[in-house]
Image (spheres, rainbow, N blue to C red):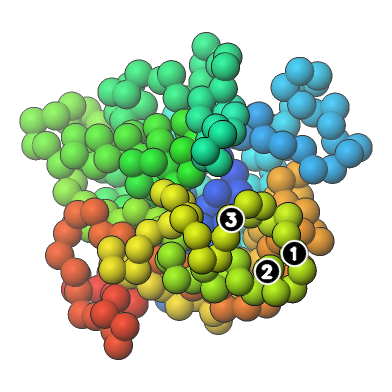
Amino acid sequence: MSDTPAQRLLLVHAHPDDESIGTGATMAACVDRGDGVTLVTCTSGELGEILVPEWTHMAADQDDTLGEHRRGELDAAMKELGVTDHRFLGGPGRFRDSGMKWHEAGHAVAADETHENAFARADLTEAADLLVEVIREVRPQVLVTYDQFGGYGHPDHIQAHRVATYAAGLAAVPSYRRELGEPHDIAKVYWTAISESRMRESLRRLREDGDTETFKGMDPDGELGPFVTPDALLSARVDGSAFVDRKMSALAAHRSQVEPDGFFFAGAESGHAFWGEEFFRLAKGTPGPLGHDGLETDLFAGL
């Protein structure tokens, strides 16, 4: 009898902590059910903002050891979620965090200068082939990654979307690079999403609680830009409320990037269902049975 789980989920994220923020509850729920969960992280997050003052020496312009540290944080976070198969695309250090800066419109854009090994500069086919090999090994029915904007414009998120999308297509081609494994067609591809109505509700609670700094400048009743997805375009809502404690523990493990008294753990949204609900857009595949709100409740629905 094969030990391979009948249902297998592959997630492609850009940096350590992205997986816990956007998909931690879904990952924990799948693990608890016995599904196979494989996380591929594309960089070590070498240029992330360091939130612990005594660790600032790890910055890229000093010791340049933040990437190694964040790999340890990711390992600890995956233990909290129960995920045992987590990898870096091409191995740790193959691609470097590209960095970013903020555009006046409020979204991320490419930094003025990038490292020669920055993920955003990677050859698309080279990077995709590394993922093709993983796809053909793991043979997932479901792939999760970002939308074409990478959620908020970060060049590494956008590149992760491109690499995952291209790799999913190449992996299914019978004649394409057979040395990378037997062809495999992923049945369903999802993009992570933030529900517009939930974001507006969250902002409203934050402002009512007196928090004007979190998502500064964003009005609960104003234009929210491409960060959110109109509810009519959502495909799935995973209720991971039973696993929200594990998600929050995973987030806390990313100590260099997540403040223990910050937005995730304090204020109006702390303890709310916001963190246990995760939303997705179906980019490929046929929707399965829908819940009462017209959304799938399981990414494997219909398979």
Measure the C-alpha gap from mark 1 to mark 3: 12 Å
Residue 35 horizontal side relative to residue 32, left or right: left
Q: Look at 43% across and 65% down and name the residue there.
A: 196
Q: Which residue is mark 3?
A: 218
Task: Check the image and name the residue furthest to the left.
Answer: 175
* Label 2: element kind: helix
Q: Position of residue 106 (x, y in %)?
A: 55, 41
Q: Nearer the viewer, residue 26 or 94?
A: 26
Pointer 1: residues within 10 angstroms few (<14), some, or many (20+)? some
Task: Check the image and name the residue furthest to the front.
Answer: 222
* Label 1: element kind: loop
Q: Identify the amino acid type marked 1.
A: Asp
Image quadrant assignment for residue 251: bottom right
Residue 159 horizontal side relative to residue 203, left or right: left
- Name above or below for residue 228 compared with residue 302: above
Decide: marks 1, 3 in contact (CB < 8 A)?
no
Image quadrant assignment for residue 276: bottom right
Q: Nearer the viewer, residue 109 or 44?
A: 109
Residue 261 horizontal side relative to residue 10, left or right: right
Q: For the C terminus, which image quadrant?
A: bottom left
Q: Which residue is mark 2?
A: 206
Q: Look at 80% across and 21% down and name the residue there.
A: 63
**Numbered badge on residue 211:** 1
Tell which circle, 1 or 3, labels the residue nearer the N-terminal end. 1
